[in-house]
């Protein structure tokens, strides 16, 4: 296979703020794998919480360029297994390679990725749209300027209940709340009771991942379902979340790509847990890949491209929560000419 790396630096429409940080750009790395006249695209992103930067990701992949380029792709899952020993300490890099391999494989078969898996897309769940932390006034403005059937509301402030009450006055949409580890046990329990009548569907990762004893208490008493994010990174975490969360949020970038994500979905279903896929502000390349998992999911948060002022690619489109697949094989993504290059 031929390996090509495309680093990008994507600007947000608005400053993207969660409980622990704020950012105006999202650095990204798109990996292209080519074989026999076909090219597949995969994506990973930088993330300070997980200590990943684009230069580090490039260096990790370049260190294994000979092994990648001497590889002949037959099955993506086998490719993942063969690459895992080299990238077991860098799931972000492995994710981009894995997505590119699945995209390449499906393009070689001249099928869309969901067709490779024989999935029915007729009842796909809708994606939410994220409202980042801001003043209440500005959060209301963001909601009004982007009408949508489901919103994910980032929280972790002293005004969390007031925020939900204020937003509820302007829409009948479903709310999902993401505290990004900002709450404690009693705060989570109180907030869940207050938010339940305000149309909140679930709470995502209310407490830090290391607070397992506290999370167990929350799980046993909370008025709303709780979904794991920072507590569910790789596939071994699914079983650890059982009995502590009602569901898991699988992020391809964190878990190492599509191959482990499929196994995580199977394991969560076996344990009777809800399943969601989430965004790490990937562009249309990574988001188009995640879209092909929709028939297997309960909830979807894949609004990354909607939050960007600039994108890397064309692929899926989103209309009022609905995902519309590109009329191309594989994930359907193709790079745009003149996409914003990474500046470092």
Image: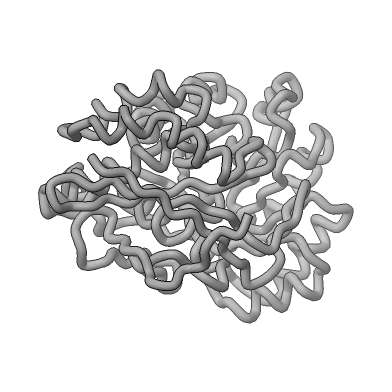
Quadrant of the rendered image containing residue 223: top right
User: For residue 56, which quarter of the picture?
Assistant: top right
Name the spot of residue 311 as percent of width and height, x first: 48, 67
Residue pictured at 74% horizontal, 62% vertical = 164
Seen at 61% across and 30% down, the residue is: 231
Q: Nearer the viewer, residue 243 or 234?
A: 234
Residue at the far right in the pictured view: 158
Q: Residue at x 48, y 50 (%)?
A: 29
| Quadrant of the image containing the C terminus | bottom right
Q: 217 above or below 283? A: above
As displayed, is residue 273 above or below residue 163?
A: above
Residue 120, visible in the rendered structure: no
Q: Quadrant of the N terminus?
A: top left
- Drawn side of residue 183 relative to residue 55, left or right: right
Depth order, front residue of 168/330: 330
Left or right relative to 38: residue 266: right
Return the x and y of residue 234 as percentages of the image width and height: 50, 28
Q: Is residue 106 visible?
A: yes
Relative height, residue 220 to residue 168 (above, below): above
Q: Position of residue 17 (x, y in %)?
A: 73, 58
Q: What residue do we see at 74% from left, 70% from top?
A: 139
Residue 135 spot, x, y in % from top left: 82, 68
On screen, residue 340 versus residue 185, left or right, reads left
Closer to us: 29 or 63: 63
**Lateral position of residue 211 relative to residue 270, left or right:** right
């Amino acid at each position: 296979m031929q390996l090509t790396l495309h680093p990008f630096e994507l600007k947000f429409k608005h400053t993207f703020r969660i409980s622990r940080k704020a950012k105006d750009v999202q650095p990204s790395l798109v990996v292209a794998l080519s074989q026999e006249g076909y090219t597949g695209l995969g994506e990973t992103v930088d993330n300070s919480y997980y200590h990943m930067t684009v230069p580090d990701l490039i260096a990790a992949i370049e260190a294994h360029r000979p092994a990648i380029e001497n590889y002949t792709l037959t099955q993506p899952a086998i490719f993942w297994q063969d690459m895992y020993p080299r990238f077991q300490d860098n799931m972000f890099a492995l994710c981009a390679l894995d997505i590119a391999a699945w995209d390449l494989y499906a393009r070689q078969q001249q099928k869309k990725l969901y067709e490779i898996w024989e999935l029915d897309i007729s009842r796909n769940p809708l994606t939410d749209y994220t409202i980042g932390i801001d003043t209440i006034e500005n959060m209301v403005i963001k909601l009004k300027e982007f009408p949508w059937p489901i919103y994910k509301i980032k929280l972790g402030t002293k005004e969390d209940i007031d925020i939900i009450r204020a937003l509820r006055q302007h829409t009948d949409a479903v709310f999902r709340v993401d505290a990004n580890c900002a709450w404690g046990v009693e705060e989570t329990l109180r907030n869940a009771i207050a938010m339940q009548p305000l149309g909140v569907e679930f709470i995502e990762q209310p407490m830090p991942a290391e607070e397992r004893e506290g999370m167990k208490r929350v799980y046993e008493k909370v008025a709303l379902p709780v979904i794991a994010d920072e507590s569910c990174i790789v596939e071994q975490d699914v079983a650890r979340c059982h009995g502590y969360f009602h569901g898991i949020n699988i992020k391809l970038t964190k878990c190492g790509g599509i191959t482990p994500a499929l196994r995580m979905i199977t394991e969560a279903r076996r344990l009777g847990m809800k399943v969601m896929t989430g965004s790490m502000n990937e562009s249309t390349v990574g988001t188009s890949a995640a879209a092909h998992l929709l028939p297997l999911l309960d909830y979807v948060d894949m609004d990354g491209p909607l939050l960007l002022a600039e994108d890397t690619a064309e692929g899926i489109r989103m209309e009022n929560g609905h995902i519309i697949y590109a009329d191309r094989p594989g994930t359907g993504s193709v790079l745009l000419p003149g996409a914003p290059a990474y500046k470092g």
